Image (cartoon, coloured by chain):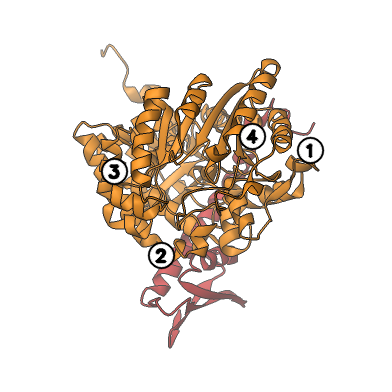
Chain colours: A orange, B red
Amino acid sequence: MAKFREQAQFDSSAQSAYTMLPWRFTPLDEEGYVATNMAGEYVTMSASEVSDFAGGALRPDQPIYDELKSRHFLIDDDTQVAIDLLALKIRTKLAPLANFTGLHIFVTTLRCEHSCPYCQVSRANDDKREFDMSEETALRSLDLAFRSPSPAIKIEFQGGESTLNMPIIRFIVAEALRRNETARRNLAFVIATNLAVLDDEILQFARQHDILISTSLDGPADLHNRNRPRPGKNSYEKAVEGIARARTALGHYNVGALMTTTAASLPQVRAIIDEYIRMDFGGIFLRPLSPYGFAIKTKSYASYDQKKWLEFFFEGLDYIIELNLGGFEFIEHYSAMVLKKMLTPLQTSYVDLMSPAGMGIGAVVYNYDGVVYASDESRMLAEMGDTTFALGNVHDHDFADIFLGDALLEPLEQSFAASVPGCSWCAFEPWCGAEPVFHHATQGDFVGKKPLSSFCTRNMALFRGLITRMEANPKVRRIFERWANIV
Amino acid sequence: MTIATGDARTVTLSRAALSVDAAKRAAYALMARYDVDVAVIGDDIVCRLLPANSTVSMETAERDFRREVIDQDLRISIEERTAPYRDAILGLAFSRTGLQDG
């Protein structure tokens, strides 16, 4: 007699039919599909597996059966625990919503000494002081920031060139720290700066208050200087020198950089990545242009299409994967944020990938003049004359007016991805964002027709590209799993 | 049944086999490529496909549309059959958050 009973004796799966739990499927390529459950966990399936599963014809001895069962796509007599686990995972994903607004962007000035044609923040000449934030506006903005229930409050200073109004940055930091003695939030500060006017006093101040620096680096010198003109034509030299000085003063990892893709960047993705490696950054965020501000006025946004950007992105991603496979660790940050949503029960705080949208409830902008915008993109739109997402003014409105008003709640409600055409039946919806500002800017309504949306087509291509790569190569999957757990 | 007229294609679907909602969803999903007019005539769903712009080839229009309708019909069926579980799971996820009535 055998010492142990057969494995099948412990498995009740075969005893009765399975029950499907909610799931969605979307084509991956000509042959296969991606299926996701309510928490965004995915499996790849053939067309016949999709049809068999949906039709109740899947057999427990088929390999896909256990895969679907382990990822809570079905329950059977063997286990019913999937319902509780799914609920727990959904609750974990949505938990950050209860914290409300964590990122508070203070536009200290619109002045800037750069004149970048792609600038998404319509800049002002650097001698026009009427575009500076006043102390009174700063105080009222801080009133609102500290009304947020978020246990973590990050105050980010943006411009123009934010440091051209250094007195208000000093004032806001001092006042926020004073208020936080009683508010006791996890308070952090970031200065977004092109580093061109950085001096030792600013660095000393940043070091004293643990302020992070976020800057722009578009790639090698010729590309960066072409993209980012300034008097002296030395934006790159200023940025590189500033990064080195800031790292010395603040610590290597307290200085971050972002790039923007222009038409001139398209043939140079490897050179751009190499520049980030040369500058000893741990990763890069390959970012397309956004349809706002000077990027529209100067036609920079229209200078390349989606197809070209995706070719640029995937050439860059494959190069980065190649580096990692060769043992050199380097991250593509947008992919990493998507992978976090695909491979973990956690969310990213990146507002473009949030649904409900991140506008207002993930991040909010206090403009130099006291107008409160639902997002950075919202104020860019306002600079073009469209004030749809202006939520109020710190001088005239209180917290409830601004955060419970129709200007915020209507776009949030209307654009909620799980209930809009195109998204509600899309398997990629758990990983995607609602983006009402983008769709309003490009199509004139908060929801947008998704098949015509470049945000939708770009993300769909990206999701498929990531899945295809990790399904084809287990080593790539391990790299992606690492990325998902870093960001 | 398919009738081709110039660049237009007319695809006829049986209401006994497929839902009108599936045809409407397919028309939505393919709007970047085809303008689709959906009409119910007797027991049939009659869909007229036209190119959405001058760059669209109509060679595969009927195949694309039929595949999309079948996918959408299956999605609707899954949604209907799993709706009680969806409600139960969301109910559990939001329990004890104070966000529910009652």
- For the residue carrying disc 3, how many other residues have a C-alpha within 10 Å: few (<14), some (14-19), or many (20+)? many
Q: Secondary structure at mark 3?
A: helix
Q: Earlier in the sequence, mark 1 or mark 4?
A: 4
How many other residues sit within 10 Å of disc 4, few (<14), some (14-19) or many (≥20)?
many
Looking at the picture, which amino acid does disc 1 mark?
Answer: Ala
The answer for how far apart the CA atoms under marks 1 and 2 are is 41 Å
Relative height, residue A450 to residue A185 (above, below) = below
**Chain identifier of the residue bearing label 4 in the image:** A
Dot 1: chain letter: A
Residue A260 lies, with reference to residue A332, above or below; the image says: below
Same-chain status of marks 1 and 3: yes
Residue to which mark 3 is pinned: A273
Using the image as rendered, state which of residue A72 and residue A61 is in the foreground: A72
Q: Nearer the viewer, mark 1 or mark 2?
A: 2
Pointer 4 and pointer 3: residues touching (CB < 8 Å)? no
Q: Which residue bears the numbered disc 4? A: A101
> Tag 2, which secondary structure?
helix
Residue receiving disc 1 = A400
Q: Which residue is mark 2?
A: A303
